[in-house]
Image (cartoon, grey):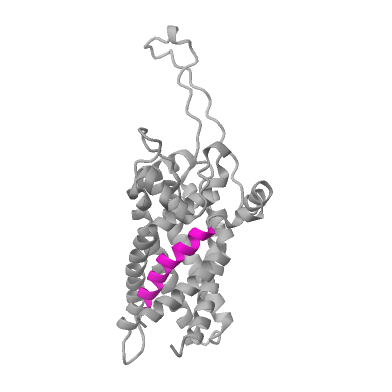
Amino acid sequence: MGVKGFVEGGIASIVAGCSTHPLDLIKVRMQLQGENHAPPVQSLRPPALNFQTTTSTVHAPPLPRPPRVGPVSVGVRIFQQEGVAALFSGVSATVLRQTLYSTTRMGLYDILKQKWTDPETRNIPLARKIAAGLIAGGIGAAVGNPADVAMVRMQADGRLPPAQRRNYKSVVDAITRMAKQEGVTSLWRGSSLTVNRAMLVTASQLASYDQIKETILEKGVMRDGLGTHVTASFAAGFVAAVASNPVDVIKTRVMNMKVEPGAAPPYKGALDCAMKTVRAEGPMALYKGFIPTISRQGPFTVVLFVTLEQVRKLLKDF
């Protein structure tokens, strides 16, 4: 293991991340749907007649919520309005994120798994797999948070009016401008959410993949091959999506919020964002982007592990 494990995991993660990037972009756009709400109308009376009485305020009827748009419609709209290249907005940030975050988590997970495997039975309990995933995911997320913030902003930029777009040229430009305009700490905005999400994703994705694959092989349901890898990957992707989607929605909104100089931020923190989201859009808003999340997690995990096996074969002599 050692450095070799990090290199193998990093290459596989970059290939998987780039190949599923459009689905990740659609997920981010769906998670931001319904975020902006018009301010309530406090009074319809002229200021001169607006006395302090209980009858002086006329409440406007609540505005209807905009209809939720599905992943296919979001993808088609991006293609029509912004062009096919927009589906890969922020792909440079994805490469950097996978290089920092996934390389770290994949390498650490394999090291911990090897260390905690029983030398006699060559088995590792599920609890230790989960613990390895939690540790590896948390450390990887802390390392890769700046690239994660840049990726979310670059993916979300196209949904803003032209005058409000940030128009980052690349992930380096995004990180540089954020550090200059908003301070270095802005690069770790939402880091607690990123760490929590990464711990959940890594523990549920990698640990469940290993456990499901082992169970399939032990029961003799399928042989060790592509069919087993695909089945275990999609099952692991579903588990990871269910566990992480609410945190992912809040993370996306906190990272994407625009803080004007001297003005209060839209969200005070993760809890405030969660409460405002649920209050304004209902509890199911925390599962916005769930379908593209599943659609991405499955292929991502399949590409990740298939590529990983091939890379290991190529590097077996090193």
Q: Position of residue 298 (x, y in %)?
A: 54, 68
Residue that extends furthest to the top in the rendered view of this protein: 48
Residue at screen point 51% across, 73% down: 304
- The residue segment tinted magenta is 91-110
Which sits in the foreground, 225 or 154?
Answer: 154
Q: Residue at x 53, y 25 (%)?
A: 61
Residue 143 visible in the picture? yes
**Residue 101 position within the rendered picture, expressed as x and y whole percent measured from the top left:** 40, 65
Residue 102 drawn in magenta? yes
Q: Residue at x 31, y 90 (%)?
A: 119
The quadrant of the picture occupied by the N terminus is bottom left
The residue depicted at 34 percent of the width and 83 percent of the height is: 114
Q: Position of residue 146 (x, y in %)?
A: 39, 56
Of residues 77 and 179, the one nearer the viewer is 179
- In terms of image quadrants, where is residue 248? bottom left
Q: Which corner quadrant holds the C terminus?
A: bottom left
* Quarter of the view holding residue 57: top left
